[in-house]
Amino acid sequence: MISNDLLYQIALTLIPKIGDVRAKALLEHFENAETIFKAKINQLENIEGIGTIAANAIKHFADFKICEDEIKFIEKSKVTPLFITAKNYPQRLLNCYDSPTMLYYKGNADLNVAKIVSIVGTRSNSDYGKNICEKMLEDLAEQNVLVMSGLAFGIDTIAHKASLKNNLKTVGVLAHGLDKVYPAQNKLLAVEMLSQGGLLTDFKSGTNPDRQNFPRRNRIVAGICDALIVIESSVKGGSLITAELANNYNKDVFAIPGRVTDSRSEGCNHLIKNNKALLITSADDLLHIMNWKDVPKKIKQQRELFIELTPHEKLITDILKEKESIQIDELNFKSGLSSSAVANALLMLEMQGVIASLPGKLYKLL
């Protein structure tokens, strides 16, 4: 039986003139996707950023047969649809202004784990880049890190294979639908990843890996992680675009330096030189900067007991008691508060000496 919710959710992603930004604006005003389609045209027009053209596009949408076919594919292929309002939607993406309205996921990795690293790089890597990538993932094996990449040739493929070898879960973000694998040479790798990670895309089935789809793919790679690592890239490579996106999303960006005479290291050196990425040479550097190194647990001093906390501040401290440290996206998700309310509560708690902020947008109780 076809779910009405899913039908309208998919339909929302197919309306001309309605992209991810406008879809998010609509969902802030309406209870769900179905109510958007049933709203009066003047209600739609009055929403900031929508206007008459987009409102008309919603009211005249009639391609529900495409949505029904997609639901059949989802059910047949055991795909998990992740609408932007779903609890299991990747919470880190919610802080991106252009969060994908709908994601299609197949796999067994938790997309909301504590530590997510995205690794990107050139398709024509050197032995140096391969060795660095493999060594870094070998050294991250004990950290329970989820590794994201784009399943492309070169560094992406090396990152996925090294993750599997070291028993790390790894997810490939695709620039096409889940009914195919591109490049075809990575089909066996993709199958192996389904049992130790997965495949993720915001494109429905039948979508080909066209050139214009890759920037959309890259924004997911950049937005879903805590740390983005660039391992070999030319100055004009797609990896630098991904790094730029990650910087815009306030992610921590890192780059592996290389010889100044090697065009494959030119992009990494450029990022470092222009303060768009931090220089790292090992997994140890990453763990130190991100404060992911295991440290002995200390008995927390319950300072908040001696301070009169607001309801929001109390809620935040209760969540922080559950873990040694927690990422801000997880705080937003667990608290159910708006991003601004969480940010204000964190600021006040930090000023009162109740919590401390750490690298990697982490917070912990003092």
Image (spheres, rainbow, N blue to C red):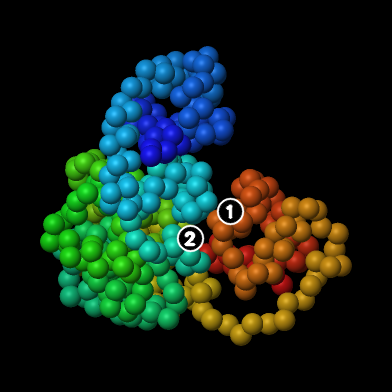
Local crowd at mark 1 within 10 Å, few (<14), some, or many (≥20)? some
Q: Is residue 276 above or below residue 142?
A: above
The quadrant where residue 348 appears:
bottom right
Image location of residue 308, percent across then percent down: 86, 59
| Up-down relation of residue 115 to residue 331 (above or below) | below
Q: How far apart are marks 2 and 1 (CA)?
A: 10 Å
- Amino acid under disc 2: Asn
Inspect this view and state whether residue 157 appears.
no
Q: In which quarter of the image is the C terminus?
A: bottom right
Residue at 44%, 44% (x, y): give it: 83
Asked if residue 36 shows in the view, the reply is yes
Q: In this view, does 170 lie to the left or right of 157?
A: right
Secondary structure of residue under mark 1: helix
Residue at 56% in and 33% down: 31
Nearest the eye: 203 or 216: 203
Determine which quarter of the picture holds residue 9: top left
What residue would you read off at disc 1? 333
Q: Quadrant of the N terminus?
A: top left
Count of picture labels: 2
Q: Which of 248 and 235 is in front in this view?
A: 248
Judge left or right: residue 212 versus residue 96.
left
User: Residue at coordinates 34% horizontally, 61% vertically from top-left?
Assistant: 107
The crowd level at tag 2 (other Cα within 10 Å; few <14, some 14-19, many 20+) is some
SS class of the residue under badge 2?
A: loop
- What amino acid does circle 1 point to? Phe
Mark 2–mark 1 contact, CB under 8 Å?
Answer: yes
User: 32 or 256, which is in the foreground?
Assistant: 32
Q: Residue 106, image x and y in percent?
A: 33, 56
Is tag 2's residue or tag 1's residue first in the polypeptide sequence?
2
The residue that disc 2 covers is 112
